Image (cartoon, rainbow, N blue to C red):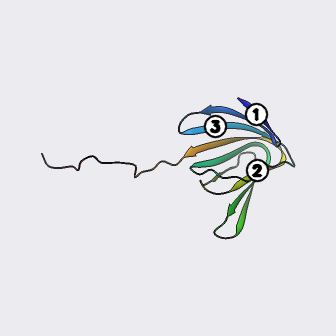
Amino acid sequence: MKAGKIWGITEVIHANHVLEFHRINFRAGFKCSEHKHEYKWNGFFVESGKMLVRVWQEDQGLVDETVLEAGDFTQVKPGKVHQFEGLEDGVAFELYWAEFNHDDIVRRTVGTKV
């Protein structure tokens, strides 16, 4: 499914209950909203063009800025306000995934000797 945005076009390539994979065409001089995801990581892999990714560090009063060019990747942790901006027209792949919780076991009993 494709969807037009003020900053370009997003297209869902694949989505299931553990990840989403999108292709985005972004336009120079446009940016997405400042937003966050409560539980999802957000990754950006730039195929062509140049993209700026901002991540607000509220606990430090800072905004981290990362410039991505073709072949570059960055990721944003859940709960972090972020935004991307097109510095040049380009294409990127955007990924969303939930972090695997290693402590997700709920025991009904405890192990014992037979």
Quarter of the image with the C terminus is top left
Q: Distance between the residues labelled 3 and 2?
A: 19 Å
Pointer 1: what residue? 3
Q: Is mark 2 on a helix, strand or loop?
A: loop
Q: What element carries label 3?
A: strand
Verify CB contact (< 8 Å) between mark 3 and mark 2. no
Residue drawn at (64%, 47%) of the image:
43
User: Is 40 placed above or below 56 here?
Assistant: above
* Residue 61 % position (x, y): 70, 70
- Specify the amino acid type for callout 3: Phe
Q: Distance between the residues labelled 2 and 1?
A: 15 Å
Quarter of the image with the N terminus is top right
For the residue pair 25 and 34, the one nearer the viewer reads as 34
Pointer 2: what residue? 33
Label located before the other in sequence (3 or 1): 1
Verify CB contact (< 8 Å) between mark 2 and mark 1. no
Left or right, residue 46 beside residue 108: right
Q: Distance between the residues labelled 3 and 1?
A: 14 Å
Verify CB contact (< 8 Å) between mark 3 and mark 1. no
- Determine which of the numbered discs, if any, sits on residue 21 in the image: 3
User: Is 35 placed above or below 15 here?
Assistant: below
Q: Is mark 1 on a helix, strand or loop?
A: strand
Label located before the other in sequence (2 or 1): 1
Q: Quadrant of residue 4?
A: top right
Residue drawn at (66%, 31%) of the image:
13
Q: Nearer the viewer, mark 3 or mark 2?
A: 2
Q: Nearer the viewer, mark 3 or mark 1?
A: 1
- Specify the amino acid type for callout 2: Ser
Label located before the other in sequence (3 or 2): 3
For the view shown, which residue lies furthest in the left direction? 114
For the residue pair 73 and 23, the one nearer the viewer reads as 23
